[in-house]
Image: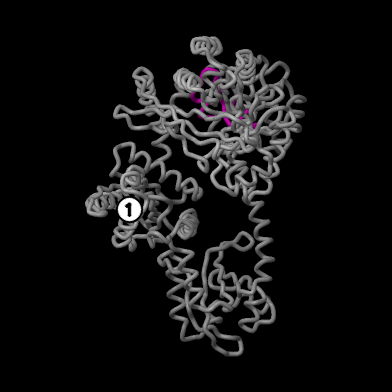
Amino acid sequence: MSNENLLRLLMLFDASEEAEVMINTLRNAGLIVRDIRAEDEEDLQMAIEDNPIDMVIAQQQLSGYSARQAGEFLIRAGRDIPLIVITPPGKETTALDVLQAGGRDLVASDQTERFKHVIKRELRDLHDRRALRRAEKMLRETEKRARILIDNSRDAIAYVHDGMHIYANTAYLKMFGYEDMEDLEGVPIMDMVSSEEHPKLKEFLRNYSKGQSDASSLEVLGQHVEGKKFKITLEFSPASMEGESCTQIIIRDQSLSKELEKKLNVLSQQDLLTGLYNRNYFIEHLDKFISRAVDGEERGALLYISHDQFTSIKADIGISASDIILTDIAQLLKTKLSDLGVLARFEGPVFTLMLRKVDAKEAGKISGAICKLVNDHIPDINGKSIKTTVSIGIALINETTSNREDLIMRAEKGAQQAQKDGGNRHHLYSPVVEEMAEQEQTNVWTQRIKSALKNNRFRLLYQPIVSLHGEPGAYYEVLVRMLDEQGEEIPPREFITAAEQMGLMNFIDRWVIANSLLTLSKRHQDGEDTHFFIKLSQGSLTDPEFLHWVSERIKSQRMNTESLVFQMSEQTALNYLKPAKRIVEGLKELHCRTALEGFGLEQNTYQSLKHLDVDFVKIHMNLVQGLAQNVENQEKIKSIAEEVSGEGRQSIAAFVEDANSLAVLWQCSVDFIQGHFLQQPEVDLSYDFEESF
């Protein structure tokens, strides 16, 4: 399973009730817990041999066994499994010997908040260690494959460290007249270039090594070992050879004309709409910059420049006119910012700027100037003046920057926060500060959600679920959006997390169900054969009054309950298997149907179907997205569709985004599809199911 919140625990406790309290604490903190219980070393050994275990949580002293003994066993077994020891309140110091035996931390049984913090910290560290081992393995395999490709390349390729050759392929040796690598090893790169070009090459290498030049290629006169001179273009990029940092030099095969090659190179780097650098070019340079920053050679910042209200502007003036605005802003930014760093159109209405040698204060000053620049510039489209503003997220780049994905995520979250604060401003995203403010934000959201429930400020949206085999009837998934005090729609990601943490999600579920039943009842009265898929949260699954409440609502509406499908995520259902099973069985007694969503990523994924007699299985989005290019996922989806069909259930592929994936799903015998390729969620139930295909 790919979910980073999954935690597979081995619990060493005498009393299962105490272990269950710890597990529920972690589940309430948002972790997906799978637990195995053990009481002695024999149980411990069997468990870690037969199961993937992420962490061991042990009482300080059990009947006939101790946490210290468990720590010593894990060391002998050579397993990287963190051990957390639970002590009686106020007795942490009595268990310090466990730390000497390999334990990672000690927590008193009454320290709930500290317990959650320790477990999440250890889980992050464990993921990092595993990722490092995977990365090292992949690096070795990649270097092996790369060496083979390099040796067979028509391009001349060499690797240089401190100006000296450490490796070169056959084409490179042949180009400069060397018999084998032994003749070239230790020869300076300067010897490959005509003497009159030495100052030019030295200057380039000096700037390139310090990261002071965006250029990565240089035209010079090469020199054969016998003295013959010829024109070459050296392309430089950072690399590693056998774990040692070095520089890769490529001299391209000149079969393509220089003019054509130049045009292709420009096109590969350029965003066609705005003329700025494109996402791929930006990411390539960002990766290089991060690499230098991690080595302590660079520092800077990433600015994530997001256009405020672009969706509403596009709806107002149209796609073509909105593209003109994007191009206009791009040229404005290019004129003022190109000298500051690498500027690109990242995606949609988002631009990114990589700044070198700036701190938080300088990045904030530049961001403020950008906000003012865009705010003061009012483009005129077809005689209509359009007010434009941007929100900017700032993420600092330094030796603590782990990878590009985290950096971009931080900058994007900064921009989102700037937009939440009203837009036309910037926000520096600091993980430590943001986590400290998270609880305060949750409290604010709690009050907003309660107010929205009290004042009926929610809205239902509907997304069609279409049969690939002509099954009659209209099927929709019901989605919910919260409205702010001005009636503006709030995306679910902004309020659902707080609602779940504060135990309010079951009340939102009830609002959705009550209003869905009203709409569905009216559709049936109008003669429309309509079916609704309605989500159930963990709050509803564990609510002992839920089934009774649903039963009463259905009776009051005199519903045809077969048109109701209640769906729950596979992760949530497995986390709360007993209540989930009770809900599924209870809904079946009411003649409602049920579905599992997010299906297919769990280990032993079909086990959930043995416990939960659901009617539909909705395949996880990670298996569907990019399906046309992923043969492994195609086989898995086909297997899921065949398995559930054989059990009399039906399969649904959600998040279908393109026609190529649709064609593959048809061949895999999937029953239904859903996604933006068909239609985005809409307020109206207006999809034409008869004309779908």
**Image quarter (top left, top right, bottom left or bottom right) of the N terminus:** top right
In this rendering, position of residue 487 left or right of residue 619: left
Asked if one can make out residue 131 in the rendered structure from this viewpoint, the answer is yes
Q: Residue 300 at x, y = what percent?
A: 39, 54
In this rendering, position of residue 160 left or right of residue 415: right
Vertical arrangement, residue 381 with respect to residue 102, above or below = below
Q: Residue 629 at x, y = what percent?
A: 62, 51
Q: 10 Å neighbourhood of mark 1: few (<14), some, or many (≥20)?
A: some
Point out the residue furthest to the bottom here: 227
Q: Residue at x 60, y 37 (%)?
A: 653
Vertical arrangement, residue 134 with respect to residue 228, above or below = above
Q: Residue at x 40, y 65 (%)?
A: 212
Instruction: Give yes or no for residue 104 being in the magenta stretch.
Output: yes
Q: Residue 116 at x, y = what percent?
A: 52, 26
Of residues 590 and 99, the one nearer the viewer is 590
Q: Residue at x 44, y 69 (%)?
A: 215
Vertical arrangement, residue 291 with respect to residue 162, above or below = above
Read off the residue under disc 1: 321
Q: Residue at x 62, y 38 (%)?
A: 468
Of residues 245 and 346, the one nearer the viewer is 346
Helix, strand or loop at disc 1?
helix
Q: Residue 84 at x, y = what percent?
A: 60, 28
Residue type at mark 1?
A: Ala
Q: How is the image coloured?
A: one colour
Of residues 142 and 541, the one nearer the viewer is 541
Q: Picture quarter containing residue 207?
A: bottom left
Q: Which residues are magenta?
A: 93-118
Point out the residue furthest to the front here: 527
Q: How many marks?
A: 1
Instruction: Give yes or no for residue 526 being in the magenta stretch.
Output: no
**Image quarter (top left, top right, bottom left or bottom right) of the C terminus:** top right
